[in-house]
Image (cartoon, coloured by chain):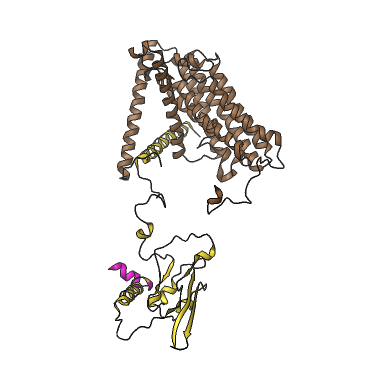
Chain colours: A brown, B yellow
């Protein structure tokens, strides 16, 4: 078909199949993308898409997720080192420093939820919550509310998402650890990165947003199939909301500098997550009646924040006096 | 760093992120500034350009006197004109009149010196071509007689319009101060 076209494929630039730099460590170089991919794919084992829709409800579910996502660092460091390229190595080192640092606030945020739920199992954490926002751990008390945002920020940094994508900062490092990669191996890196975005959303949904919990309607009592579908849709939409938010953050915030990234993690997020952890522990001694009042108040506050946000959006639209236009697809 | 500035940093971060997120969300319902060129545009870009836009040069050979002023003034000699004389009739005619758009730097000197306004900038800017030779514009595909301005004004109706267009171009756009005068009107 190319012969029919006027502008043909340029002949000299055609890659000859498997591209591995001559100076690279070939074995590690070709293995690295799969290590990253396995680290991402293994998390799907414990993601609870529905009440019965889970591959294996491990009793250490959330710990397992923290463990296998750490495998991504190994793969990225392998890619950076084996490419034998300064950009790749710098990208790999940055990524290692970033992911290892941000695992601490992320782990502490997860620990907060584990204390509340009293279990590490993903299904157990969801069952400890309810279908209504007032039963979610997000609105359990003021500390978990802050913890959620700490977790989400730390997870974005762990997933190398903007504004924390310094390992592949194109203005400084060409493409970071993927500089030397092309073809299928390149794809595996980015498959893992974008897939990780969904995993972040799914874990955030499980930990803080009540997972697949649906209202106990009479409709669902006779039909387990409908119940399963409703649970799956609920979980899927909640998880995708956070994928949307991650892209939205990407459209909003500029990339941070390396020192700013480390300052944010060690000076702000780690102390804050400790405060939230201790605060939640303290809150667990509060009488149950009062806890319920605080949860309802927090849910009200959340609703108020959403309303204030949309009022602000309307204000921005009025301020700019734009031509209104809604077409999400191009 | 004291506690007050520490707390202020956190509050500032949250507030500015909140504000930024509301601005980007409002962009979901705003029309984008970009134009889907060249596929989805309501009218050709050429028609929307300002009239003094210096696009690719065009020549109206019907009113070109063959004075070669443009060829001489062109700093990079992208205009080449060939003029021959037929011996029997003593009629001079263009053999070729080529403008190499590859070389042209759109300085506009040729359109300023032209006495009749025959050479001028068009609104055309799309210069894509498969090879450099395709960018050489040939304005005299076959030999054509030179234009001789008649004393007391042009009489042939077809040429009157062309002379007027050329004169208007000279008055309004080609002269350095003429453009400013035209904009004032």
Q: Locate residue A33: give its quadrant.
A: top right
Q: Main secondary structure of the magenta part?
A: helix
Quarter of the image with the C terminus of chain A is: top left
Q: Which residues are magenta?
A: B174-185
Q: Image height check: is A162 above or below B122?
A: above
Q: Position of residue A94 (x, y in %)?
A: 60, 36
Nearer-the-camera pick, A234 or A116 = A234
Q: How far across and how far down the image is residue A90, in percent?
A: 63, 39
In this rendering, position of residue A262 left or right of residue B36: right
Please report the residue visible at 55 percent of the width from the left and 45 percent of the height from the top. Answer: A171
Q: Residue at x 39, y 19 (%)?
A: A230
Tell me if residue A109 is in the magenta stretch. no
Q: Position of residue B20 (x, y in %)?
A: 40, 39
Toward the left, the furthest residue is B185
| Residue A238 spot, x, y in % from top left | 42, 25
Queried whether the magenta region covers residue B182, the answer comes back as yes
Q: From the viewer's perspective, is B176 left or right of A68?
A: left
Q: Is residue A130 visible?
A: no
Residue B51: image quadrant is bottom left
Note whether residue A10 is visible: yes
Q: Nearest the camera: A106 or B103?
A: B103
Between B87 and A313, the residue placed more toward the observer is B87
Residue A325 left/right relative to A51? left
Residue at (72% x, 42% y) in the render: A23
The mark total stands at 0
């Amino acid at each position: 078909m190319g012969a029919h076209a006027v502008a043909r494929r340029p002949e000299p630039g055609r890659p000859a199949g498997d591209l591995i730099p001559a100076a690279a460590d070939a074995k590690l170089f070709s293995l690295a993308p799969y290590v990253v991919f396995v680290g991402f794919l293994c998390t799907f084992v414990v993601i609870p898409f529905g009440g019965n829709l889970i591959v294996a409800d491990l009793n250490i579910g959330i710990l397992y997720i923290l463990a296998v996502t750490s495998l991504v660092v190994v793969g990225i460091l392998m890619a950076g080192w084996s490419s034998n390229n300064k950009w790749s190595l710098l990208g790999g080192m940055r990524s290692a420093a970033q992911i290892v640092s941000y695992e601490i606030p992320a782990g502490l945020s997860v620990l907060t939820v584990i204390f509340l739920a009293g279990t590490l199992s993903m299904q157990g954490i969801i069952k400890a919550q309810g279908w209504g926002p007032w039963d979610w751990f997000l609105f359990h008390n003021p500390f978990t509310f802050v913890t959620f945002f700490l977790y989400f920020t730390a997870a974005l940094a762990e997933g190398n998402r903007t504004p924390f994508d310094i390992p592949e900062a194109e203005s400084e490092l060409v493409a970071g650890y993927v500089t030397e990669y092309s073809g299928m191996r390149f794809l595996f890196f980015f498959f893992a990165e974008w897939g990780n975005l969904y995993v972040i959303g799914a874990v955030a949904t499980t930990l803080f947003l009540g997972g697949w919990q649906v209202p106990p309607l009479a409709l669902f009592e006779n039909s387990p199939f409908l119940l399963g579908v409703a649970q799956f849709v609920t979980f899927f939409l909640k998880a995708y909301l956070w994928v949307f938010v991650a892209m939205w953050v990407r459209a909003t915030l500029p990339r941070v500098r390396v020192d700013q990234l480390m300052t944010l993690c060690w000076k702000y997020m780690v102390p804050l997550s400790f405060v939230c952890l201790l605060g939640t522990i303290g809150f667990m001694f509060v009488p149950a009646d009062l806890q319920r009042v605080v949860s309802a108040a927090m849910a009200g506050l959340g609703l108020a924040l959403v309303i204030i946000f949309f009022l602000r959006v309307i204000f921005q639209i009025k301020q700019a006096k734009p031509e209104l236009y809604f077409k999400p697809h191009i | 760093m004291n506690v007050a500035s520490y707390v202020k940093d956190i509050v500032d971060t949250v507030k500015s992120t909140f504000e930024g997120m509301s601005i980007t969300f409002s962009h979901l319902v705003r029309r984008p500034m970009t134009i889907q060129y060249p596929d989805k545009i309501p009218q050709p870009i050429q028609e929307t350009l300002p009239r003094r836009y210096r696009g690719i040069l065009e020549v109206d050979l019907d009113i070109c006197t063959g004075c070669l002023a443009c060829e001489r003034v062109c700093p990079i000699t992208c205009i080449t004109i060939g003029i021959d004389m037929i011996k029997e009739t003593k009629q001079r005619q263009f053999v070729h009149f080529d403008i190499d758009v590859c070389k042209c730097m759109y300085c506009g000197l040729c359109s300023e010196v032209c006495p009749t306004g025959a050479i001028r900038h068009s609104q055309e800017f799309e210069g894509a071509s498969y090879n450099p030779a395709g960018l050489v514009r040939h304005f005299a595909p076959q030999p054509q007689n030179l234009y001789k301005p008649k004393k007391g004004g042009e009489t042939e109706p077809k040429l009157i319009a062309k002379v007027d267009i050329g004169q208007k171009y000279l008055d309004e756009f080609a002269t350095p101060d003429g453009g400013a005068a035209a904009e004032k009107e």
